[in-house]
Image (tube, rainbow, N blue to C red):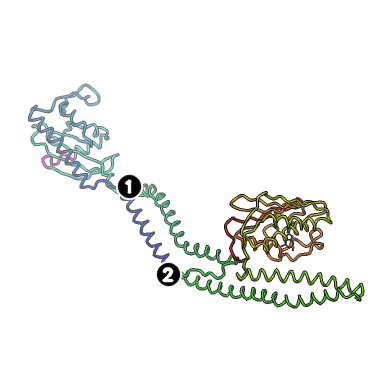
Amino acid sequence: MTTIRSRLTIWYTVAMGVVIVAFGTALVIERRHPSFDELDQRLSLEAGVALGYITESHRVLGELTTLDSVPGRGGVGWTPMKVLATDVSGYLEGMRDPLIVVDSQGNLLYASAEARTLSYSALEAMVGLLRPRPGVQVTGTVKLEAVGAVRYLAAPLPDAGPNIAALLVATPTHAVTFEPRQLIRSMLVIAPLILLGSVGVGYWLAGRALQPIQDMMDELEAITDGRSLHRRLMVPRSGDELARLAIEVNGMIARLEQSFSGLRRFTADASHELKTPLMVVRAGVERALTNPGAPADSIEALDDTLNQINRMSELVETLLTLARADEGRTTLAVEEKDLGPLVAEAAETAGMLGEAREISVTASLPEHPVLLPVDSGRIRQLLLNLVTNAIKYTPEGGAVAVELEDTGEQVTIRVKDTGIGIAAGDLPHVFDRFWRADLSRDRTEERPGFGLGLAISRWIAEAHGGSIGVQSRPGRGSTFTITLPRAAAAPSGPS
Ligand code: ADP
């Protein structure tokens, strides 16, 4: 079985076979009835019982017939008629199948309760069967009016006296015949059950056939989340189409990994290479700025240049950090620290930044020290990103609150503002690299930035084994929440 195609074919064939066998078995069980042999056995048993009883009764009682009066011809008067004595006939009433007893002239002496339910002509036909050879035991099948085919057994009664010659017991054969109408009826009963079973089997088979694909999809999903490109799909040993697919996909992931790492290395190298010239340029500009003879317009131009150089250095530094983090090369300098002073410091910076625009800043800290193993430099950077954003995106007169909460198992830091907020559709993207809200948005030009601050903030939170999230409503403000677990922070982490 080297291909899914052949495997499916085999499964399908087996399933089909099972369905056919199940259908056939169900049909046989539903229509299982005695065979003709069994019918004959039943008839001979009944005949034997009746014969035994009549013979024994005759031995004990003697003559078993009496005269009874029946309405005469044309309903005029009464005619005497020989019948079986009630002592005997009473016992025979209990027979399951129609039974008749005749005398040697072929006249009916007794018809059992079952036989009396038959039509007159059917009864006549039964009597007729006994006439030709009353002395011989005969079995056969005959068609009776309104009854259909019946199996009968005619047996002589040699020891029941001169007036009793033979008996006949009969039973319909429809119980053992398999007519198309009955077949269709049975099929209609069984088919829905088999169909229901087939749906179940089909569903299970389809699930089984698709399971390896499902597994592969799960694996792929885990790999292509962007952090696990070093992982590969497991190649099934079946050597089928799926194995080939896994090999192809693995090749593709390898090529993707190569180009991704090339890209990261390029960003890291480029950022690194840019750092030194930028430092040189900055030193030059700073020196020129301190030149006392410089004209005022040159000073202004140099000042602008210095601002831009600082922005560029910041960008280069952030890019380098992210690129290194992607490569897993950034390590955290983890140390047990009290987070209280770090949060207070961030709130203080926010206060200074918001002073000019009359933004009130409050800090809420627990009274006890909140000790946690963290890279304090990175946590400071993270808090600074959040508070500068809070100030940057909060209009004049607004409020910013910084909260630190220690629940024992984890530490939560919240940075809340009453600023412009973030549209619901933008929320999933705020932590993406280089993502900034719609540039046409209110006063965005006045809020410089690269859209990297939150990306690096997320990396810092995750590198500490924690997470960062945001809740926001446009026009109402935003709340950024960092959660840091009590467990020791990872020394490094991918972005
Ligand atoms: P930027 O340098 O643009 O601030 P960030 O990564 O820090 O980059 O933020 C990404 C974007 O998320 C911002 O451009 C802004 O649109 C939005 N944003 C971040 N913080 C806030 C906030 N406190 N209020 C409103 N929008 C915010």
As for residue 336 lying within the magenta part, the answer is no
Considering every residue shown, the one lying at the far top of the view is 77
Q: Earlier in the sequence, mark 2 or mark 1?
A: 1
As for residue 130 lying within the magenta part, the answer is yes
Most prominent secondary structure in the magenta stretch? loop
Residue drawn 42% across the image and 70% down it: 238
Amino acid, disc 2: Ser
Q: Which residues are magenta?
A: 129-136
For numbered disc 1, what is the local secondary structure?
helix
User: Residue 353 appears at what percent x and percent y?
Assistant: 80, 58
Real-space Cα separation, disc 2 to disc 1, in angstroms: 43 Å
In-image side of 257 versus 433 (left or right): left
Which residue occupies the foreground of this view, 109 or 264?
264
Which residue occupies the foreground of this view, 403 or 104?
403
- Assign the N terminus to one quadrant of the image: bottom left
Q: 10 Å neighbourhood of mark 2: few (<14), some, or many (≥20)?
A: few
**Figure check: 397 above or below 165:** below
What residue is pinned by disc 1? 30
Residue drawn 21% across the image and 34% down it: 95
What residue is pinned by disc 2? 238
Residue drawn 77% across the image and 52% down it: 361
Looking at the image, can residue 469 be seen?
no
Looking at the image, can residue 95 be seen?
yes
Q: Is mark 1 within 8 Å of ligand 1?
A: no
In-image side of 408 versus 174 (left or right): right
